[in-house]
Amino acid sequence: MLNFTTSLRAIDDPTFEVILKNEIEQLDANFLPLQQGLTTGGYALFASFNVMIIGVTKNTRHVHVKAGIFYHGVIAGCSCSDDPSPTDVTTEYCEVLFEIDRGTGEAIVSLVSE
């Protein structure tokens, strides 16, 4: 379960988006829909990613955060011994929506479809 209690403590602070960005970047990438967001590669690499906050909307129950995520994927060859094509690393980008419960800090994340 994703939890953003640190960010919620700073919700009315001018640095909220910076704190939120840092908290998202500390997440285990396996909790993000990076594999589903691939556009070029065949497999998402979960070693590192960077986040860009696109927009934040707030109501009494939730904070909705649209974020762009930059990460890497690979285009894998057939892995045959005579395959001349090396494994290529590609830069990937996807947009996600976090819905954060203002009471608990628990969040769900979904891929934003184009």
Image: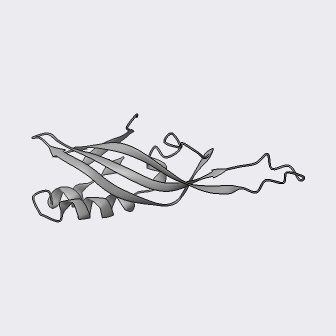
Please tell me in which quadrant of the rendered image residue 62 appears.
top left
Q: Is residue 38 left or right of residue 64?
A: right
Q: In this view, does 49 lie to the left or right of 98?
A: right
Which residue lies at the image location 36% right of the left edge and 44% below the top edge? 96
Q: Where is residue 81 in the image (x, y as percent from the top left)?
A: 89, 53
Which residue lies at the image location 40% right of the left edge and 34% below the top edge? 113
Residue furthest right as drawn: 82
Which residue lies at the image location 49% right of the left edge and 42% below the top edge? 37
Q: Is residue 106 left or right of residue 41?
A: left
Residue 70 in view, yes or no: yes
Looking at the picture, does residue 62 appear above or below residue 44? above
Placement of the C terminus among the 4 image quadrants: top left
Please tell me in which quadrant of the rendered image residue 61 appears.
top left
Which residue lies at the image location 61% right of the left edge and 47% below the top edge? 43
Q: Where is residue 20 in the image (x, y as percent from the top left)?
A: 26, 59
Q: Position of residue 46 (x, y in %)?
A: 53, 56
Residue 104 in view, yes or no: no
The front one of 2 and 45 is 45
